[in-house]
Structure formats: structure tokens, C-alpha cells
Image (cartoon, rainbow, N blue to C red):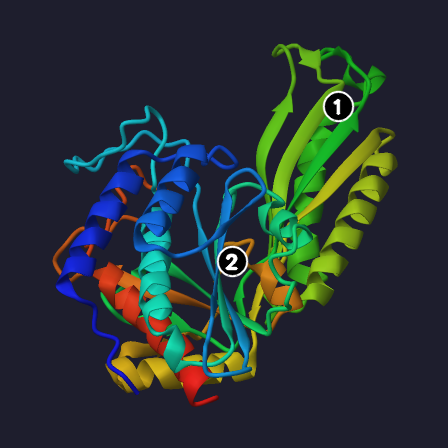
Amino acid sequence: MESVELQESLVQQLYQIRRHLHQYPELSFQEFATCDFLCSRLNEWGIPYKRVGDTGVVVDIVGENGKGLHIGLRADMDALPIQEKTGLPFSSLNNGVMHACGHDGHMTILLGTVYQLYQRKNMFRGRVRCIFQPGEEADGAAEKMIEQGVLSHPPIDEMLALHLWPHLPFGTVGVRYGAMTASCDTFAIEIEGKGGHSARPHQAIDAIAVSGNVLQGISYLVMKETNPVDPVVVHVGKILGGTATNIVADRVIMEGTTRAVSKETREKVKERLVELVEQMVTSFGAKAKVTYSEGHPPVINDREVTRAFVESVEELLGAEAVHILTEPSMGADDFGAFAERVPSTYFRLGICREGVPCHDLHHPAFQFDEKIIPLGVKILTHSVFKRLTEGV
């Protein structure tokens, strides 16, 4: 197989691209300047593309060696509402907005992969569809792109996506067979009691007291009604209720998330949470309204696609560079919407250097060594090239 080494001139371009993207981050579904910048680079390289929706970009690279697999690659584009505190010379110039989740790196890696594959399209068969996806930090972005046809015309057979990861050594790859990340759904519970004076609690129905019992019921649901070896999180992160110390609250609103790594458990938690809350609140004489919204599905890695990917990374970097993760993350990524429809692999690319502070994702001081960018390009390019030339 041809070497996937990058020319130094391309590496320097990619560093400059990443710094520009980092300096001008944009929130979910507002990535207009980001989209324009990516398109301008593709224009400079003479690589055709199409815009999808308001801010998405898709590049199709058709191999010239005949028919073969159609492989999709995805990178997310959006930033977070965080005030940057990295001290980088190319820190965000957009006040209160920061690439604190590495999406600037993801876009740059995919852009470099586009360049590498486009230059070699006469050497492989099939098709590579590179998807720059807006709105990953929001809800419904991946679904919207799927509705807009990014998995069809012609259909995609399998997909890859990466995420920079501060919990793995620099340059290593973390992946697992099966569940990689959890689903993430949201719920709101509105408890309607009966207001009154705290001196006469028997004449009222205390919505705050009822909410305390609901919290206990949620704990019971997690501990006693779900399989202990099938991870589940039901988290209440916000409670609003009460107006004064001597008034019995007549209304409480509780909001939270549920997470699961299997479709069956996800459905069961949704069903039982609604049932349990309604039954418990009613038993105290109060009323309950539960609003449940499905968000990102879990990312489930396909065994065959993952096997081929692992084999590719081991060939490129050595077996010691691959970490087969023992457990899924209970975080979420809307790449799960793609993985639900197309056999896929989602992997972590380690960025933690020994002796260097490594902040977690979504931290205002999050940053990474740019040398991970050419390595990421090599990993994606090698994996795709191997798949579309050797068919393994």
C-alpha cells in the first residue's frame, strides 16, 4: 500500500487551518463563517463539494478503479458557549464561544483526509463521502442531515468518525466492539400540589416533599429495575420550586437526562420513568405532567467495520497503539444516528501527553497538541485506502 505520509507543506497548511477555525468558533447551527472557510479551502485545492442545509458541507471522492464500498467520514463543526481560558495566541475572538470539544481538530483532520484521498482517487475503487456536520452539540443535527440525503444518492455502506480524547495517551486509539457511547434523552417533571401555610401543612400538598420522594423513586428505578451490568444513568440536574420559607410549595419542576447503551434499556427506562413518577405523585394526592424527549441514540460500533479499522491502525502504528476499551462512555454523540442506519465505527484519538496538563472536554482551558492532526489524517486515510484497495 502507498505510504500515507503527508507533505510538510500540507501539514503547515493544516496547522493554519486549525488555528483559524479555533479563533473563529461558532455555535450550533450558526457555523456560517466556518462553512464558508471550509469551502474556500476546498476551492483553493480544486476539490468539488456541495453545501447541505445552511452550514453543512459534503465532499464526494469517487475512486477511479471501479465499483467498491461507499465509505462515509464525519466531522462535527460547532463550538460551545464557553469563555476560553487557554492563553493560546490564536484564542477565540468570538466572546463567550470556544472550541472546547476539539471540533476544530476534527474538521481539520477530515479536511486533510479529503486532500489526501482526492490526490489518490485513481488508486482506489468505490466512493468516500466526507461529511462536515453542524450542530453536534445540539439536538437533531445528524438526523436533519440524514433527512437531507447524506446517506443516500448513492447509499453509504459504512462510516467512520473520531473524537479527540484527553483520557488516552497521545497518539493512541481507543475503540471497542459494540456500545461506544450512550443515548441521551431529556425529561421534565411538573408536580402540581396544593399551596398553603407551613404552620398548617395538613391543609396543603407539599410539591417539594413529593419531589423528594420522586428522587428516591428514580434511584429505585436505576438500582432495582435495570440490569446492573447494562449501564444506565437517570440524572436530575435542575429543580425549581418554592417561593418563601413559610409557604408550602404548590409547584415543582424537575429536569434531567437519562442515558443507556442499549435500545431495549433505553425504551424501558423511558416507559418506567413516566409510569413511576405518575403513580408516585398521584399517591400523594398531587398531579404530575411528564415530558420526555428522545435525543441522541447510543453509538453502537459494528463488529466487522471495527475489526477492519483496528487491523488498519495496528498496521499503521503497531498493536500497542490500539486500546480496546473495556467500557462504553456514558457521554453521547449524535453520530449514533448514522450508526443506527449504517454499520459504523466511532473511535477515540488520544491527546494526553505525559507531564502536560490535560483538561477534559468542555473545559475552558481545553487544548491539544497540533501534532495530533497529521496523525489523525494518516489514520483515516490509511483505513479508508486499505478498505477500498484491499477490501478488508
Q: Is residue 96 above or below residue 63?
A: above
Residue 247, image x, y percentages:
69, 11
Mark number, residue 206? 1
Crowding near the residue tagged with mark 1, few <14, some 14–19, many ≥20 C-alpha atoms within 10 Å:
many
Q: Residue at x 17, y 66 (%)?
A: 7
Residue 345 falls left or right of residue 115? right
Residue 39 lies in quadrant: top left
The residue under the point 37% across, 45% down is: 38
Q: Earlier in the sequence, mark 1 or mark 2?
A: 1
Three-letter code for the amino acid on which mark 1 is drawn? Asp
| 364 vs 192, nearest the viewer | 364
What element does badge 1 sit on? loop
**Looking at this view, is 226 or 174 the one in front?**
174
Position of residue 254 measured from the top left corner of the image (x, y, whole percent)? 66, 32
Inter-mark Cα distance, 1 to 2: 34 Å
Q: Position of residue 65 (x, y in %)?
A: 46, 83
Query: Would residue 235 be seen by someone viewing this image from the given angle?
Result: yes
Q: Label 2: which residue?
A: 330
Q: Quadrant of residue 124?
A: bottom left
Residue 381 place in picture, x, y as percent:
35, 72
The quarter of the rendered structure image containing the N terminus is: bottom left
Mark 2 belongs to which amino acid? Met
